[in-house]
Amino acid sequence: MSNKLHFDLIQKELDFYLRLKKNNDSLWSKRLSIWIKKIVDENGKVRKDVLINFRKYSTLLSEIPNSKKNYFFNLIYQFVRASGNRYSAEETLSNFKLFSNYSNLKNTKLSLVGNPGFYYTKEGYIYNERFLRHLRNIENIENKILSKNNPISKIVDIGGGYCQFGEMIKRKFGNVKVTTVDFYEQLILGYFYLLENFPKEKICPMSKIMSTEKIDNNFINSYDFVLIPVEYFKKIEKCDFDLLTNFSSFGEMPNAVFKEYLSSEIFKKINFFYTVNRLDSWPDYNNGISVIDYLVDRFQPIHFKVSPIWTNYYVSYTSFFKPIKKAFKSRNFEFIGKNENR
């Protein structure tokens, strides 16, 4: 049962945001009229069922596998599509066994906050694709950065969605401070996700970010988690993050926005940069971004390879036949670089 206090905190956040938007048209976003209806009812009250099941319904971020808030759709999904997702997830797990430390799966639990709905069980362990990918990411950080006696105390995760990576890495390395940057609507779900997973930790909500003048080291160090909407990213100053991460979303951004992040003061000052992105954003995204754009001169590569986790996926049209195996249009690469100027 979800904590009523957490629903109240989410309602408080949404009320603050809606008042701010109504009082300042320049901040109004076309996204608001679309996503807000998924989270609040016609009276502006938070939809508790949506929060409890946001991963199951893929409310604002696609979860694989997922469901829909429709009984008949679920029957069709399980009959037709679930077979393909099962094969895809099993191949991801097989790759994980081959190229990662399988004991990490045994020692890490998939959080059920947000009700992932469809997930898979193997040898008594539950998993889905996103969970396995982040296990791989955390293992790379542990083996390629921490094993070389490089301390990581502050991480900023660009495009962190509902904060699953932040949740998982916090459980792995308890003292780390995690800052997540994303669209406000994603962070609403992230706020709920973190409140439910870490009821005793200090979590800075978005309203605090909007109200504060600047975000510096003292500010970041005052919290375990900080959630920053993308439009307030520039408020961060004089903050020395040890690691900046981005998984997938750099390759999905408009080129100009991507370059803004790479030219920001934060990016110039970080000790390590870790990203997993498409070798070429085309043809999914027509932004001209490829692997070449990530290889910033000041970062010495300490880990650079095509990701062995994502290889193929399966398309299923019926549960009676084995799904068709297909290759991704563009494979993903893993890059960890050390800032030579630090």
Image: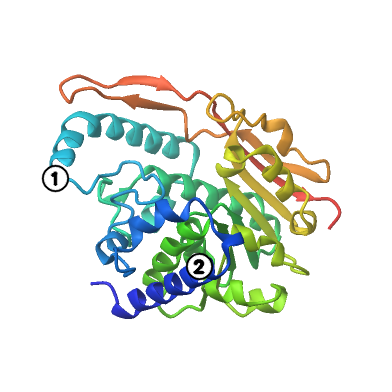
Pick the front one: 79 or 119? 79
Please provide percent x and percent y for residue 305: 63, 33
Q: Which mark sits nearer the N-terminus, 1 or 2?
A: 2
Instruction: Please report the residue visible at 29 percent of the width from the left and 78 percent of the height from the top.
Output: 4
Question: Residue 275 occupies which quadrant of the picture?
Answer: top right
Query: Residue, x 18% and y 46% (percent of image)?
Result: 70
In the picture, which quadrant includes the C terminus? bottom right
Quadrant of the snapshot with the N terminus:
bottom left
Sort mark 2 into few (<14), some (14-19) or many (20+) by Cα contacts within 10 Å.
few
Which mark is on residue 22? 2
State how the image is colored.
Answer: rainbow
Measuring from the top left, give residue 119's x and y in whole percent: 28, 46
The answer, for residue 262, to whether it is visible in the render is: yes
Q: Amino acid at mark 2?
A: Lys
Q: Amino acid at mark 1?
A: Tyr
Left or right position of 191 against 138: left
> Which of the two discs, 1 and 2, sits closer to the camera?
2
Please report the residue visible at 27 percent of the width from the left and 22 percent of the height from the top: 323
Q: Is residue 236 left or right of residue 43?
A: right
Q: Are marks 1 and 2 in contact (CB under 8 Å)?
A: no
Looking at the picture, how far across and down is residue 222, in whole percent? 61, 80
Residue under label 1, please give it: 71
Secondary element under disc 2, as helix, strand or loop, is helix
Q: Which of the pair 53/326 is nearer the observer?
A: 53
What is the secondary structure assignment of the residue under circle 1? helix
Q: CA distance from mark 1 to mark 2?
A: 37 Å
